[in-house]
Image: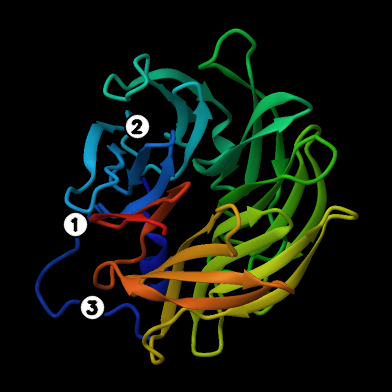
């Protein structure tokens, strides 16, 4: 099996002077990476964290400044692959990545997640690659699961009527860019976000390491538009978030002139994507790269449109989108040392940020 580096480390190694030979008589026999790579709330109170070492942990949000997160369940993916995708399915179910030919659907009969078990295994052709991201939407009134894969494909699944844990693969879509922006020729689909616009057929935007933002009509798999997020990019897309007609894209900024957060608007009349603003979330102005690991929106009634990002410098950034689609950065708080970035998830006012340690916040 080919050894895979976490994305920030892979990017650093490609920078000039980024790979330095050890001055010791030692041969690298391998490293197990334990940092988080994905987090998602699976109901209003519980969230799941997937790590690079293949562990999946469930936590109950405490809502208390005097007590840390309470673990509800810790398991290992049977295939011992890093958990790269966690997608809530409702009805006490959620899906995760497994190996390059299957997804796992996890369930809890009690609803409190302490009795977590694998409810079903969803298999597909290994040419698609391991699941990197996903989202659930309604397509023509049918519950639909949309998965982004490592080899640049998107798979669409619909729930089998009467059997909650089972989903049937309906079609796949090739979203690979002809000329990837990254130097490795990678096509990993790192983000899938539902778009609550259109006529009910179900629409998503995908973001890939090859640089493409792709709008897909889920009902028939049609690609409605393709946009390179930054024609001058040196790295691809790590994460994306959609709220209404607003789209945020997180990437790795390489060099002082690059940006790692981009804001766009989505027009459902033609499904065009238009850049409105960009910025660089950076503490050290001399850093060779600043990896923006994750981006999420916060949706509070009556509040400005707010968002959060985590960067490899160990910072949790907060900002707002003001009229015209412009980015206004409020500031940042440190949630650790340079830790390759934290996986973020949000439920109402509850925010969890996880790299190695878990941090919980209440948005006030």
Circle 1 is placed at which residue position? 29
Using the image, determine if residue 166 lies above or below residue 262. above
Please tell me whether mark 3 sits on a helix, a strand or a loop.
loop
* Residue 183 visible somewhere in the drawing: no
* Residue in the foreground of this view, choosing between 224 and 309: 309
Question: Would residue 188 be found to the left or right of residue 202 on screen?
Answer: left
- Dot 2 alpha-carbon crowd within 10 angstroms: few under 14, some 14 to 19, many 20 or more: few
First along the sequence among labels 2 and 1: 1
Question: Distance between the Cα atoms at labels 2 and 1?
Answer: 21 Å
Residue at 46 percent of width and 29 percent of height: 94
Image location (x, y in percent) of residue 355: 30, 57
- Crowding at mark 3 (Cα within 10 Å: few <14, some 14-19, many 20+): few
Can you identify the residue that label 3 sits on?
A: 21
* Nearer mark to the viewer, of 2 and 1: 2
User: In the shown orientation, is residue 110 left or right of residue 40?
Assistant: left
Query: Vertically, is 351 above or below 72?
Result: below
Q: Quadrant of the N terminus?
A: top left
Q: Are marks 2 and 1 in contact (CB under 8 Å)?
A: no
Residue 36 placement (x, y as % from top left): 33, 52
Which quadrant would residue 167 be assigned to in this image?
Answer: top right
Residue at 51%, 40% in the rendered image: 131
Q: Residue at x 46, y 65 (%)?
A: 309
Res. 295 visible in picture: yes
What secondary structure is found at the residue carrying circle 2? loop
- Quick check: 85 left or right of 335? right
Question: Which residue sits at x=26%, y=23%?
Answer: 114
Q: Percent from the top left, x then y, of residue 82?
A: 36, 44
Viewer-proximal residue among 209 and 351: 351
Task: Determine the secondary structure under disc 1.
Answer: loop
Q: Earlier in the sequence, mark 2 or mark 3?
A: 3
Q: Nearer the viewer, residue 187 or 3?
A: 187
């Amino acid at each position: 099996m080919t050894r895979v580096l976490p994305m920030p480390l892979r990017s650093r190694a490609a920078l000039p002077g980024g790979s330095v030979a050890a001055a010791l008589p030692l041969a690298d026999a391998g490293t197990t990476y334990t940092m988080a790579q994905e987090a998602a709330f699976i109901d209003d109170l519980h969230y799941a964290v997937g790590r690079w070492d293949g562990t999946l942990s469930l936590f109950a949000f405490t809502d208390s400044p005097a007590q840390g997160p309470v673990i509800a369940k810790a398991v290992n993916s049977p295939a011992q692959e890093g958990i790269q995708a966690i997608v809530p399915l409702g009805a006490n179910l959620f899906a995760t990545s497994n190996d390059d030919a299957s997804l796992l659907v996890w369930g809890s009969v009690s609803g409190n997640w302490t009795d977590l078990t694998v409810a079903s295994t969803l298999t597909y052709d290994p040419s698609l690659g391991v699941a990197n991201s996903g989202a659930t939407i309604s397509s023509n009134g049918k519950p639909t699961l949309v998965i982004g894969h490592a080899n640049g494909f998107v798979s669409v699944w619909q729930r089998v009527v009467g059997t909650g844990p089972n989903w049937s693969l309906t079609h796949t879509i090739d979203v690979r860019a002809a000329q990837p922006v990254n130097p490795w020729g990678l096509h990993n689909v790192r983000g899938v976000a539902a778009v609550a616009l259109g006529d009910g057929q179900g629409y998503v935007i995908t973001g890939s390491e090859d640089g493409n933002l792709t709008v897909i009509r889920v009902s028939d798999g049609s690609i409605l538009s393709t946009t390179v997020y930054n024609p001058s990019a040196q790295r691809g897309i790590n994460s994306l978030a959609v709220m209404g007609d607003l789209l945020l894209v997180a990437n790795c900024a390489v060099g002082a002139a690059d940006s790692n957060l981009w804001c766009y608007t989505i027009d459902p009349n033609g499904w065009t994507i238009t850049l409105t603003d960009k910025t660089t979330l950076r503490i050290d102005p001399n850093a060779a790269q600043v990896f923006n690991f994750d981006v999420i929106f916060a949706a509070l009634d009556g509040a400005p449109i707010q968002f959060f990002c985590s960067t490899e410098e160990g910072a949790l950034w907060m900002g707002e989108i003001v009229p015209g689609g412009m980015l206004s950065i409020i500031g940042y708080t440190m949630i650790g040392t340079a830790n390759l970035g934290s996986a973020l998830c949000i439920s109402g006012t509850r925010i969890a940020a996880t790299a190695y340690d878990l941090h919980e916040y209440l948005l006030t």
